[in-house]
Image: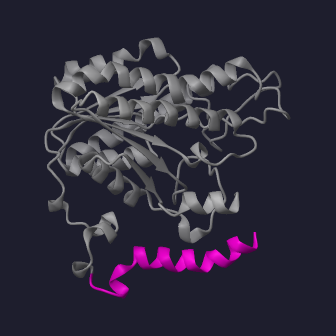
Amino acid sequence: MRLAWLLLPLIGILSWWLTTPSFFLPSSLLPSSLLPSSLLPSSSLPSLANKTVLITDASGGVGAELARQLAAHHANLMLVTRTGRTESLTNRRTVYNKEGKSNSPQSQTQISAYTWNKLVAIREEALKLGSSKVEIMSFDYSNVEEVNTIVGAVVEKFGRLDYLVLNQEEVARGYVVKTRHGQTPDFVSRTFGVNVYSSIELTLRSLPHLEKTQGHILLLSSLLAHVAKPGLAVLSATQHATHGFFYSLQRELRERMSGVTLTVGQVGELEQSEKMSLFEVPSWTIGDRAECARVIVESLVKRPCSVRYPWLQGPLVRLLGS
């Protein structure tokens, strides 16, 4: 612990320097590899115009911001929001009764209508920002057998698929020892269905279409893939599972010299996040949602093996055990 406190000032200075390079040198004198994505000229990125991008969970947060920024690059968008959520409208926490069952059909309907209305508004924004075509749909990701309806809708509406962004996540809290609902098969099955099985199935269904366009897959995950935390055992297990599958798939695609590429992304704590905070981190490490989306856009065109934002947060959380 003493070592952690000794390293904190050094980490802070390094982070500050990387996020404010012009304090020491004009940004034009720094190599692009050291510049934050917000300082990179947009002309340095390959064109995304008329490319078709499928984004899951696009009704808010990083997904919505990503849709806006891709629209500014004139990409065509298929935006998907969720039905059958288990989050409360008021406090965004999973609601359970004494038997450990999720919230009522009435509140589920309210949430579905709420997220749908948000997605409609984002579609209008995207069209104004530069997209020539934006389609929207809702889907219950726990219904894994029907995932192909999403891919079918993309092909029907756009005729092609260039980028697949997997952003869906069931933020399921439940102490395995303290609470009954954290142990129920339904709780575990639904969480894995949304976070793991739907991502795998959506990827496998999309691969034939991505092969035709030499497309790209980007999985967005959280710090729980590397850091354990009480009360989030099932959620953490899903993050480990997706990393295991998608890193393995990444190597398979390389071995067969496929035109399809894959990036495993990790998103930490962000300002004004619509999701519940998973870790307590120093304020100077908290990322910006717009900057996070810019990093993702850059990753779509540069296609790295992995990407992290904020890059410093993961090592710090592992160091301090937050």
For residue 35, say whether it is visible. no
In this view, the residue farthest toward the top is 145
**Image location (x, y in percent) of residue 129:** 21, 50
Considering every residue shown, the one lying at the far front of the view is 255
Magenta highlight on residue 19: yes
Residue positioned 68% across, 26% down in the render: 103
Q: How many marks?
A: 0
Classify residue 47 as left or right of residue 151. Answer: left
The part of the chain drawn in magenta is 1-26
Q: Position of residue 242 (x, y in %)?
A: 51, 33
Please determine whether, in this image, residue 188 is positioned above or below residue 217.
Answer: above
Left or right, residue 164 beside residue 84? left
- Magenta region's main secondary structure? helix
Q: In the image as oriented, which residue stretches furthest toward the right?
A: 178
What residue is drawn where x is 40% and y is 33%?
A: 56
Q: Is residue 229 left or right of residue 260?
A: right
Say which quarter of the image contains residue 192: top right
Q: Quadrant of the C terminus?
A: bottom right
Residue 322, compared with residue 221, is above or below; it is below
Task: Please provide percent x and percent y for residue 9.
Answer: 60, 80
Q: Residue at x 36, y 80 (%)?
A: 21
Q: Nearer the viewer, residue 165 or 100?
A: 165
**Residue 290 shows in the view:** yes
Where's residue 16, x and y in %? 47, 78
Asked whether 135 or 14 is in front, the reply is 14
